[in-house]
Amino acid sequence: MSPECVFVLDHYNDYISGELTPEKIARVENHLMSCPHCEKFLGRAFRIHGHTVGLLRIPAPRVLRKSISNLLDKA
Amino acid sequence: MKTKSKNRLAFEDEVMSNLDSMYRYALHLVRNPEDAGDLVQETCARSLKAADKFKRGTNARAWLFAIMRNIFFNQYRAKSRGEIPSDWTDEVVSGDQRFTGSVWPQPFEMFLRSVMREDIDKAMDELSADFRSVVLLCDVEGFSYAEAAELLEIPVGTVRSRLHRARTSLQKMLSQWFNEGLEADES
Ligand SMILES: [Zn+2]
């Protein structure tokens, strides 16, 4: 494992969160182009993250939406 | 009928467009759909009283969440029951298609998604409330670390470390799903 692999491992969560500086983003992405192992690792992390977030992103029940809409209309 | 001011209409837009987020945060706080609905109603009623002070461009969601959190700590905490029943509505099962995409073969997709959702709920329940709240705010609602830190009144570094640990736990608990999902996706 190269120092750049370690860098990706240390920063991939912040990368997913969009909390890295442009310089660090470039460093991560640069490494991904030359390291299939990290590319696969990060791809998997993104996929798991996307699925989990997507399924947790439930909508408010319609009946609640309607009652809030009424509340705003009346006020 | 009284004409509403521009600010007031902008405020109403913000409330309606943040309603799903408010419901999810309420559900996270009170852990049952009925109380979550009440908490959202109360948050809206409370925020309406201050609607005239609302300025377009304000981070309305952070403001609404702060009001909700306040109401929760003052009123609901004692009676919150701590369980999310599995009989959520059908809309709940479907989640947000924009984020999950269509990885599964179509005829099984809805079924798989509903089963997977149950597992994700269970995995979320396994997390402590502190960890769940950062997953909800940062991952589900897209708060920055700094915004979540401000709402939760904890340091940014704590948000970061809790989020990373929570994600690792969720990944471990759900790994079977994602290994299968990935194989299907990569074939
Ligand atoms: Zn690497």
Image: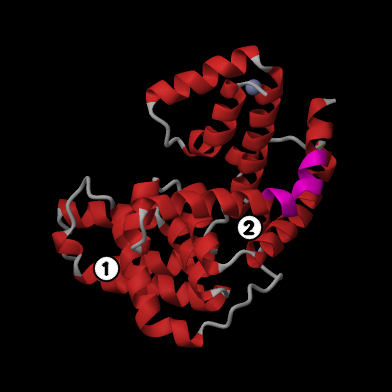
Dot 2: element: helix
Mark toward the start of the polypeptide (2 vs 1): 1
On the image, the x and y values in percent for residue B131 come to 54, 60
Q: Mark 2 points at which residue?
A: B91
- What amino acid is found at the position of numbered circle 1 in the picture? Ser
In magenta, the rendered stretch is B171-179
On the image, the x and y values in percent for residue A44 come to 69, 33
Chain bearing mark 1 = B
- What amino acid is found at the position of numbered circle 2 in the picture? Glu
Q: Name the residue under label 1.
A: B47
* Residue B3 in sight here: no
Nearer the observer, B38 or A49: A49
* Residue B134 placement, left or right of B57: right
On the image, the x and y values in percent for residue B154 come to 36, 60
* Residue B93 placement, left or right of B155: right
**Would you place residue B52 above or below residue A35 in this image?**
below
- Residue drawn at x 67%, y 62% is B121
Cβ of mark 2 under 8 A from ligand 1: no
